[in-house]
Image: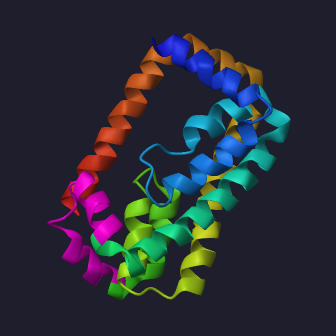
């Protein structure tokens, strides 16, 4: 099952519509979608390592624009859209604590969240809800998301074919490790 899904993703990554799909997934993930764009970015860079920085650019732009939508959700549509997203991640209890942190350290919170595997949409929505300066929020989003996606592209480009073969050889183990990281990220959110 995992190998078929991997092959499907690799085929999508090599298709002519891959860049559009990457942009849309990055845009959606920063505002409401639960799956990170790395799911497409990684196989796309593995399939075409020389285009890795272009893919990271597309991913960064999509994510920053999606972050702006997340900010808008927090600012204008919190009761309708934002609260269900926050409930989905089980972060309702700690949301007021997050508000206090935002009032004190919003730039650093956005920078760390943008670079980390923690679901970014929680922080884009929070930035809008708690009134972070939009211009600063957007610039920090571009820088932190860009740093993350360009680091991924650089590492994969550097690893190239050797890394692709390593991923394919240890796919099941890597899947378990990634799943554990996602669970750890959700646990961390609940502890905030």
Q: Residue furthest right?
A: 50
User: Residue 44, relative to residue 117: is it above or below?
Assistant: above
Residue 146 in picture, x, y percent from top left: 66, 60
**Is the image coloured rainbow, by chain, by secondary structure, or in one colour?**
rainbow
Quadrant of residue 76 within the rendered picture: bottom left
Tell me where residue 70 appears, x and y as whole percent: 47, 68
From what the image shows, is residue 50 above or below residue 85? above
Outermost residue to the front: 80
Q: Quadrant of the N terminus?
A: top left
Quick check: 48 above or below 76?
above
In which quarter of the view is residue 75 placed?
Answer: bottom left
Q: Residue furthest left?
A: 93
Q: Is residue 87 above or below residue 70?
A: above
Give the quarter of the image for residue 157.
Answer: top right
Q: Residue at x 66, y 23 (%)?
A: 10
Q: Is residue 188 left or right of residue 160?
A: left
Q: Is residue 41 magenta?
A: no
Please indicate whether residue 13 sits to the left or right of residue 188 in the image.
right
User: What residue range appears in magenta?
Assistant: 80-102
Majority secondary structure in the magenta region: helix
Residue 89 visible in the displayed image: no
Image point (22%, 71%), residue name: 95
Asked whether the viewer can see residue 60, the reply is yes
**Picture mark count:** 0
Of residues 25 and 46, the one drawn nearer to the viewer in this rendering: 25
Q: Quadrant of the C terminus?
A: bottom left
Residue at screen point 62% across, 36% down: 40
The residue drawn where x is 55% and y is 72% is 68
Residue 33 image position (x, y, % from top left): 45, 50
Q: In the image, residue 191 lies at what x, y percent?
A: 19, 58
Side of 14 where 119 appears, left or right: left
């Amino acid at each position: 099952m995992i190998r078929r899904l991997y092959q499907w993703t690799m085929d999508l990554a090599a298709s002519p519509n891959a860049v559009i799909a990457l942009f849309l997934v990055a845009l959606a993930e920063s505002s409401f979608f639960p799956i990170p764009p790395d799911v497409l970015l990684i196989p796309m860079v593995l399939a075409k390592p020389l285009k890795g920085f272009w893919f990271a650019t597309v991913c960064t732009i999509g994510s920053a624009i999606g972050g702006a939508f997340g900010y808008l959700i927090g600012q204008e549509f919190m009761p309708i859209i934002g609260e269900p997203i926050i409930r989905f991640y089980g972060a309702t209890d700690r949301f007021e604590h997050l508000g206090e942190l935002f009032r004190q350290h919003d730039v650093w919170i956005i920078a760390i969240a943008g670079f980390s595997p923690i679901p970014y949409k929680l922080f884009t929505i929070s930035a809008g809800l708690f009134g972070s300066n939009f211009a600063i929020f957007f610039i920090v989003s571009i820088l932190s998301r860009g740093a993350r996606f360009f680091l991924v592209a650089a590492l994969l480009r550097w690893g190239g074919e050797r890394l692709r073969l390593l991923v394919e050889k240890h796919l099941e183990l890597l899947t378990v490790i990634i799943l554990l990281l996602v669970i750890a990220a959700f646990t961390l959110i609940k502890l905030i």
